[in-house]
Amino acid sequence: MLTGYCDYYSQESRTCSTKIVLGGKNETEDFQANLQFRILSKDFTFPPYGPINGAKLIQRNGIRLKNQNHLYTSADPCWNRTTPISNGLTARNSLCCMSMDSYNPGCLYYKSTTSSSYNDKKVVFYVIYDFSETAYSLLVNIDQAPQDSTITVLSYSQDISTQTCQASTKQPTVKCLLKLSKLNTYDIRYITNFNTNEDGIVTIIVGANSQVTSPNVSKKNRCIDFGIPGNSTEFCCGYM
């Protein structure tokens, strides 16, 4: 349980702060905790309001997340919630990330965008790669493809059987949870239902703190383009 006390009535500015210690948690350990409030009058003449579910404190792979594992970004830095308490009253809460650079020095995720043409057929799709200490996920999204198409993304590693994640024009966004390779190397390829020849997307090498070391992208060097005419890929560091 996380505990803290803030005496609102002793502050002339009607603001107050308190420090909540995440006991036993370090910068890389995953955790999730509920942040709840109870409100008391100055003289305790009315019953306390609460507990009010203020927010969730979530850390995964050293990254602080909102509820439902959504990312804090500079465009959307707050987790907001309105909670009914009693007698028709509601509590409005916001939990915000105040400093993006110090909060996240590395890439939060990685994204490849691939554009390919086969005769008169063109496909455009992206893959979001999210690495953790226990698994990694692929989110495949089809932006453009002929009707009734499928795109299957394949992940090859020497120590693991081939892993796949398939999206279709009927279900254009699919997320798959895959096993980690002890060799930390993943050759990512894809096939379509109208072209079963494998085409390369990217070869990924993962280093410390689940950060990709190859291709060499970062917050300062965000994207790298590679491929051949008719089959090009942009690989990017995502941090917002």
Image (cartoon, rainbow, N blue to C red):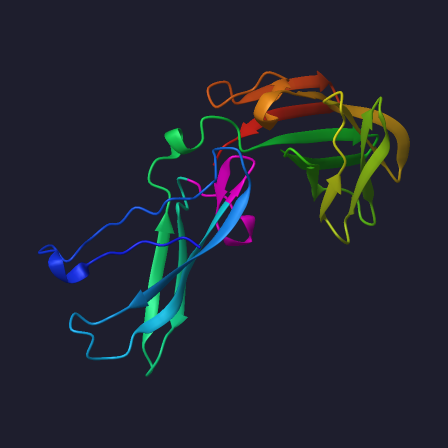
Is residue 212 toward the left or the right of residue 154 in the image?
A: left
In-front residue for pair 154/95: 95
Q: How many marks?
A: 0
Residue 64: within the magenta?
Answer: yes
In-front residue for pair 74/51: 51
Residue displayed at 60% across by 19% down? 224
In-front residue for pair 229/197: 197
Residue 97: within the magenta?
Answer: no
Above or below 230: residue 142: below
Q: Quadrant where the N terminus lies?
A: bottom left
> Residue farthest to the bottom?
87
Is residue 102 toward the left or the right of residue 110 in the image?
A: left
Residue displayed at 36% across by 54% down? 3
Is residue 93 toward the left or the right of residue 213 in the image?
A: left
Residue range highlighted in magenta: 59-73
Residue 25 at x, y = what percent? 48, 39
